[in-house]
Image (spheres, rainbow, N blue to C red):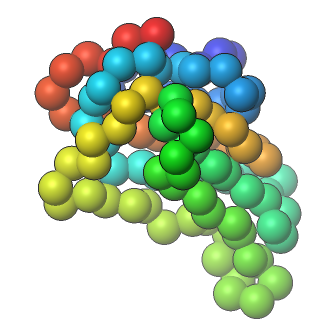
Amino acid sequence: MANDITTNPLVLDSAAATVIVSNLFRITAIKWTVDSGGADNDTCVLTDKNGKVIYEEILNIVTSGEVQAPPMIFPVPLKCNGLVCLTLSGGKVYVYWDGQQPTA
């Protein structure tokens, strides 16, 4: 599967340094779900198109016992200038948005 920016939420399953969303949009929540093969120190990093980190999560299964990252919810939507899925060790990232449709 490829990244899908036509839905709400956006569904990201591939990491690359390329811009996925190019316009200004508002993020209401981010949820990273890790496959059953998730491992300690699996990482997910999302940035805007200028390289500003908007989400970074590292699983610490050994210490915390958590095998899924908690959702990040923005009570006031986060204005984001584009989107890049810079790092994704596994699983999928769901980016919920509000307002203007994100476009490539």
The quarter of the rendered structure image containing the N terminus is: top right
Residue 9, quarter of the rendered image? top left
Question: Is 102 placed above or below 30 here?
Answer: above
The residue lying furthest to the bottom in this view is 63
Residue 5, quarter of the rendered image? top left
Q: Residue 99 in the image: x percent, y percent?
A: 15, 27
Question: Of 77 and 73, which appears nearest the observer?
Answer: 77
In the image, what residue occupies the spot 26% across and 17% down? 101
Question: Of 42 and 78, which appears nearest the observer?
Answer: 78
Left/right of residue 40 with respect to residue 80 in the rendered view: right
Q: Residue 56 in the image: x percent, y percent?
A: 59, 58
Question: Of 29 and 52, which appears nearest the observer?
Answer: 52
Q: Residue 77 in the image: x percent, y percent?
A: 21, 48
Question: Is 8 placed above or below 91 here?
Answer: above
The residue lying furthest to the front in this view is 50
Q: Is residue 6 visible?
A: no
In the image, what residue occupies the spot 52% across and 29% down? 49
In the image, what residue occupies the spot 69% across and 66% down? 58
Question: Is 82 placed above or below 61 here?
Answer: above
Left/right of residue 8 with respect to residue 3 in the rendered view: left
Question: Is 99 placed above or below 72 here?
Answer: above
Question: Of 74 and 38, which appears nearest the observer?
Answer: 74
In the image, what residue occupies the spot 26% across and 58% down? 74
Left/right of residue 98 with respect to residue 57 in the rendered view: left
Left/right of residue 45 with respect to residue 4 in the rendered view: right
Residue 6, quarter of the rendered image? top left
